[in-house]
Image (spheres, rainbow, N blue to C red):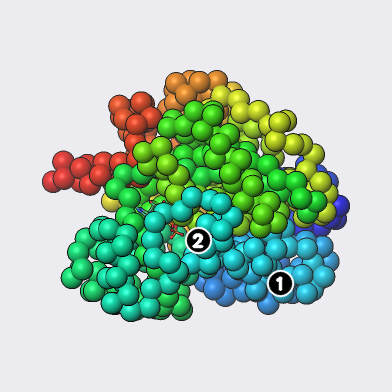
């Protein structure tokens, strides 16, 4: 087993990984920018190295500085968390070249799944159902129109190198497609340094359902059920729950087995998430994330599996300690992502926390690096806390989340806690009856009411 792990991340996820390491008796090294020197992930680590100025490009994305930090501290592995360098195949390769273990899948799997066109082709060949679309990249306006005739309007233009819900365009007609195609190509080039785009059928009101997988280097692979992440705003997840209110256990077993077969076929190891849109009883693969997800704790709550611990174990070459038949799903879990944003306008609200009290009690989990007196820097993602609860039934889970939100005090900045409280009183959410458009429409309606 590793003696020392460097955690190449910040905030709640850096802390989450640090906790797993400490419970395994592994020493930790935190890295941080100058803006984060007072952060909790720095305070609680065994060692900390400053890797650059506030801008993420110069610090948390600074490969050379991070490798140097690992080398001087004698770390034998690097955990990248999510975001930043977690899906950077080149980084994973450089880490290995330095004799350090990258806690994650192989560079080959990262790059295969990182290119959406190749990912979709690989998924299809491995037996996963995919969204009908262009066969690979679309290289001209004419080719786009030809493909759209085949797929049927409306279509969605997506960037091959896209991510984070950015760079997608809907086209309802050939004229619109001509225009959008040019724009999408130019924008993809500017945003991702790769102008390649592809097309998919635009699904009107699907749910977003993803399957968590876990594999080792000995050919064992299991799934840990699904997460329903349909509540999204601007393609960003806001609230997640498991099990999905739309699936029964037979459907879960079925899709889970299909995913495990596909993962075995491509020889995947470590933690990963296969994302699908789900409409009218059918699954459509959209992408695979070859890393730990923000919403992984809800899966941990109902399965009892510590995903970070398992990632570390399998990266060290150990076998998974369990098989599919050993995994039981107990009750329900929900997660609210709490952002430093105004809950009506979504304007970012960084600044000093003047008062802080986290909820507690039975089956409540808070993942956050916040404390009273901490100043949230303006340079990074606005996610500041995740509130996760578990219940024996969905109703119990919902009531527990409402009471936990009620207890949560974060003073000095705006947060999205009021939005979560409000959503959890809506009939559609109480009934579990929502799709990926629900929240966007709801928020739009709130802002008209305000006017
Ligand atoms: P990214 O990597 O940028 O997050 P994804 O392919 O995962 O892109 O899609 C993000 C979100 O965009 C999905 O969760 C869904 O809300 C929406 N989306 C993606 N593909 C489609 C589609 N074919 N039809 C309708 N909505 C889609």
Above or below residue 389? Residue 381 is: below
| Mark 2 to mark 1 CA distance (whole Å) | 23 Å
As drawn, the label of residue 120 is 2
For residue 7, side relative to residue 240 (left or right): right
The quadrant where ligand 1 appears is bottom left
Whether label 1 lies within 8 Å of ligand 1 gets the answer: no
For residue 173, side relative to residue 142 (left or right): left
- Residue under pointer 1: 93
Q: Residue at x 16, y 45 (%)?
A: 448
Q: Residue at x 60, y 68 (%)?
A: 111
How many numbered marks have been drawn onto this rendered protein structure?
Answer: 2
Whether label 2 lies within 8 Å of ligand 1 gets the answer: no
Callout 2: SS: helix
Q: Residue at x 45, y 74 (%)?
A: 192
Quadrant in which residue 66 is drawn: bottom right
Quadrant in which residue 145 is drawn: bottom left
Q: Nearer the viewer, residue 168 or 78?
A: 168
| Residue reaching furthest to the left | 451
Question: Which tag is nearer the camera, tag 2 or tag 1?
Answer: 2
For residue 3, side relative to residue 107 (left or right): right
Estimate the x, y position of residue 386 in percent, counting from the top left.
Answer: 52, 42
Estimate the x, y position of residue 323 in percent, counting from the top left.
Answer: 74, 36
Q: Is residue 286 in view from this perspective?
A: yes
Q: Residues within 10 Å of mark 2 (few under 14, many from 20)?
A: many
């Amino acid at each position: 087993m590793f003696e020392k792990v460097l955690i190449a991340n910040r905030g709640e996820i850096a802390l989450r990984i640090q906790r797993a390491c400490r419970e395994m008796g592994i020493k930790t090294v935190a890295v941080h920018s100058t803006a984060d020197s007072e952060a909790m992930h720095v305070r609680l680590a065994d060692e900390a190295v400053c890797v650059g100025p506030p801008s993420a490009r110069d610090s948390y994305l600074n490969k050379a500085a991070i490798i140097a930090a690992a080398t001087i501290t004698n770390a034998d592995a690097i955990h990248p968390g999510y975001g930043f360098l977690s899906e950077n195949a080149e980084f994973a390769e450089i880490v290995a070249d330095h004799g350090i273990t990258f806690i994650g899948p192989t560079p080959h799997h990262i790059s295969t799944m990182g290119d959406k066109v190749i990912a979709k082709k690989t998924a299809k060949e491995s037996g996963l159902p995919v969204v009908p679309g262009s066969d690979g990249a679309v290289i001209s306006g004419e080719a786009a129109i030809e493909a759209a005739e085949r797929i049927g309007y409306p279509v969605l233009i997506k960037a091959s190198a896209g991510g984070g819900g950015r760079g997608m365009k809907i086209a309802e007609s050939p004229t619109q497609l001509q225009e959008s195609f040019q724009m999408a190509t130019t924008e993809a080039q500017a945003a991702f340094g790769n102008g390649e785009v592809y097309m998919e059928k635009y699904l009107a009101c699907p749910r977003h359902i993803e399957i968590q997988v876990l594999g080792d280097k000995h050919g064992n692979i299991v799934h840990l059920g699904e997460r329903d992440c349909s509540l999204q705003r601007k393609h960003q997840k806001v609230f997640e729950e498991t099990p999905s209110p739309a699936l029964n256990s037979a459907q879960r077993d079925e899709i889970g087995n299909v995913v495990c077969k596909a993962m075995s076929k491509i020889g995947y190891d470590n933690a990963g998430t296969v994302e699908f849109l789900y409409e009218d009883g059918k699954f459509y693969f959209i992408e695979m994330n070859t890393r730990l997800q923000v919403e992984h704790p809800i899966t941990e709550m109902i399965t009892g599996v510590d995903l970070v611990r398992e990632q570390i174990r399998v990266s060290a070459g150990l076998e998974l300690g369990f098989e599919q038949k050993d995994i039981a799903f107990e009750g329900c879990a929900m997660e609210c992502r709490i952002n430093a944003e105004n809950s009506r306008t979504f304007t970012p609200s960084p600044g000093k926390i003047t008062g802080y009290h986290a909820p507690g009690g039975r089956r409540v989990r808070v993942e956050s690096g916040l404390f009273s007196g901490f100043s949230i820097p303006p340079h990074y993602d606005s996610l500041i806390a995740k509130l996760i609860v578990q219940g024996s039934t969905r109703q119990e889970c919902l009531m527990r989340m409402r009471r936990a939100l009620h207890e949560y005090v974060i003073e000095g900045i705006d947060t999205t806690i009021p939005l979560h409280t409000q959503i959890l009183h809506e009939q559609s959410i109480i009934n579990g009856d929502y799709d990926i458009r629900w929240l966007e429409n709801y928020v739009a309606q709130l802002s008209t009411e305000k006017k």
